[in-house]
Image (spheres, rainbow, N blue to C red):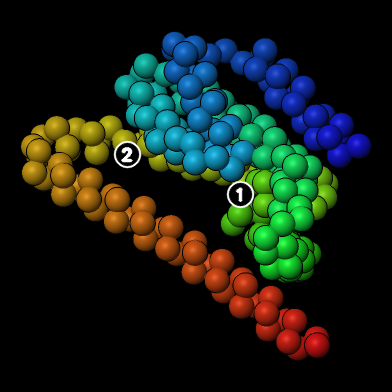
Amino acid sequence: MRLARAALWIPPLALLHLHHHFHGPEVDYVGLAVGAAASWAGLPGPGEPLLIAAGVLAAQHKLDIGSVVFVAWAAATAGGIVGWLIGLGAGRALVTAPGPLLGPRVRAVERGERIFERYPIAAIVLTPAWVAGINRVRGRVYQPVNAVTALLWAAGIGFGAYLIGPAIVDAVGDMGTVLGAILVAVVLALVIGEILRRRRRRGRLDEAVARARSETS
């Protein structure tokens, strides 16, 4: 039943594709779609780099920014559904399968379920799609959050790269190898900082759940 309900999200995306006019090489959009879907399914895919590159190409009039954002959003939404379904079926069975460390694994799943029950939206946003499936998040909760988050991701990164990407590319070309390397290092530092910030947020979420458990016990 959950699989059938999730599948209902796919035909509207296909219909939108049929009525949407794409400007530029189709292979670029296909690559963007594959990367976005893989990333949102929970795989370490090149979703963000491909979306940034597509935004820069759109600013150079080689692609259409509306098409870029649309493809990224549709593929990310579909990838999130696939990852959630995998976690709902095979993922949970794998984590709770008999074997070494069964007790800790089962307790981890139980703790995750309490977190998703108490903070469903935050937990969905901060964890990969298959984690939401493992913790049995209902489709009526997961799918709207997944679609909205994918839209914010696609529009935020896509339009951001469209607006500021060419300036960064031109700056790297003008400043030379050394200064370009410094700029790349700064960007990497910002990315690492964002990753650490998200980890701290997850840690605070776990601490909040632990405090809630201690208060109720």
Front residue of 109 and 98:
98
- Type of amino acid at the residue the image marks with label 1: Pro
**Residue 55 horizontal/vertical position (percent):** 40, 30
Which SS class for mark 1? Answer: loop
Mark 1 is surrounded, within 10 Å at the Cα level, by few (under 14), some (14 to 19) or many (20 or more) other residues, namely: some
Residue at the limit of the structure toward the right, as seen here: 1
**Residue 26 visible to an observer of this rendering:** yes
Tell me if 163 is positioned left or right of 182 in this view: right
Q: Residue at x 80, y 53 (%)?
A: 136
Residue at mark 2 to residue at mark 1: CA–CA distance: 28 Å
- Type of amino acid at the residue the image marks with label 2: Ile
In which quadrant is the C terminus drawn?
Answer: bottom right
Q: Residue at x 75, y 42 (%)?
A: 90
**Residue 158 visible to an observer of this rendering:** no
Q: Residue at x 71, y 53 (%)?
A: 95
Look at discs 2 and 1 and give the one toward the viewer: 1
Work out whether 131 lies above or below 109. above
In which quadrant is the N terminus drawn?
Answer: top right
Tell me if 23 is positioned left or right of 161 in this view: right
Residue holding disc 1: 128
Which SS class for mark 2? Answer: helix
**Residue 62 horizontal/vertical position (percent):** 37, 16
Tell me if 216 is positioned left or right of 204 in this view: right
Work out whether 190 lies above or below 46. below
Tell me if 182 is positioned left or right of 98 in this view: left
Residue holding disc 2: 164
Q: Quadrant of residue 25?
A: top left
**Residue 40 horizontal/vertical position (percent):** 59, 40
Q: Of callouts 2 and 1, which one flags the residue occurring earlier in the amino acid sequence?
A: 1
Q: Residue at x 45, y 35 (%)?
A: 46
